Amino acid sequence: MNTKLHAITDQNGRPLSFFMTAGQISDYTGATALLDSLPVAQ
């Protein structure tokens, strides 16, 4: 059994948001879950 940790970071690599999924779940699931937490582009 394993897990994946999906993360959004700022330009310096500092974490802004995390989402954990089971290892067998597609990466698209993690990416979709994090899209709403992306900061607004400047």
Image (cartoon, rainbow, N blue to C red):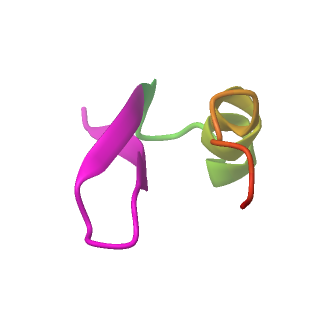
Residue at the (63%, 29%) spot, across then down: 37
Q: Position of residue 15 (x, y in %)?
A: 27, 46
In-image side of 27 versus 40 (left or right): left
Residue at the (77%, 37%) spot, across then down: 32
Quadrant containing the N terminus is top left
Tell me which secondary structure the magenta stretch mostly adopts.
strand
Residue 34 drawn in magenta: no
42 up-or-down from 15: above or below: below
Q: Quadrant of residue 16?
A: top left
Residue nearest the viewer, comparing 27 with 31 = 31
Residue at the (74%, 57%) spot, across then down: 41
Q: Position of residue 33 (x, y in %)?
A: 68, 27
In-image side of 11 versus 39 (left or right): left
Q: Position of residue 13 (x, y in %)?
A: 26, 67
Q: Residue furthest front?
A: 42
Residue nearest the viewer, comparing 15 with 32 = 15
Q: Position of residue 26 (x, y in %)?
A: 66, 46
Residue at the (65%, 41%) spot, across then down: 38
Quadrant containing the C terminus is bottom right
**What residue span does the magenta drawing correspond to?**
1-19
